[in-house]
Image: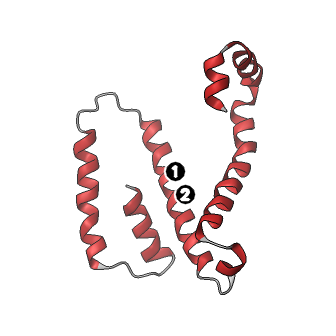
Amino acid sequence: AEPAVAAVLSQFVYKKKISRAKWLCLPIVIGGVILASVKELDFAVSALVSACIANLFAAFKGNENKKLMDTEGLKDRMGSVGNQFALTAILGFLMSIPVAMFKEGSKMGEFISLWKTSPALSINLI
């Protein structure tokens, strides 16, 4: 659904015209996702809502990054699109730390003790 959300946001929020070919490809992509998940009997509404929110923010991030790269002289100052992606990823991580601490901070002690006793966790996390 992310391509559909990105197309709708681009068209109606950012006022960027989406080509007819892209609009015609969306039902095929969405249909493929539906077919792939048809046999899924264990359905959680909270997972669907979380995925929809993640898709919405990913679409906003993509559109904002494109708008940012269209800024005159920014490509020269940043060096490349890869640097912009790295900065976006780092900033996103840093902004998610307070939310993660709010939601899961009470389990930090349990995590640290598991980190010390489980080599699989400590090796794979690094």
State which quadrant residue 44 falls in.
top left
Q: Residue at x 65, y 59 (%)?
A: 86
Q: Residue at x 22, y 44 (%)?
A: 35
Considering every residue shown, the one lying at the far top of the view is: 117
Give the SS element for disc 1: helix
**Left of 32 or right of it: where is 42?**
right
Vertical comparison of 94 with 22: above or below: above
Question: Number of callouts in the render?
Answer: 2
**Left of 51 or right of it: where is 89?**
right
Residue type highlighted by circle 1: Ala
Vertical comparison of 27 with 73: above or below: above
Q: Position of residue 104 (x, y in %)?
A: 70, 31
Could you say which is closer to the camera, residue 2 or residue 93?
93
Q: Position of residue 94 (x, y in %)?
A: 74, 50
Q: Quadrant of the C terminus?
A: top right
Vertical comparison of 47 with 69: above or below: above
Label of residue 54 in the image: 1
Vertical comparison of 72 with 24: above or below: below
Q: Residue at x 32, y 79 (%)?
A: 19
Quick one: label 1, few (<14), some, or many (20+) residues within 10 Å?
few
Q: Quadrant of the N terminus?
A: bottom left
Residue that numbered label 2 is attached to: 57
Residue type highlighted by circle 2: Phe
**How much space separates mark 1 and mark 2, taking CA atoms?**
5 Å
Could you say which is closer to the camera, residue 90 or residue 18?
90
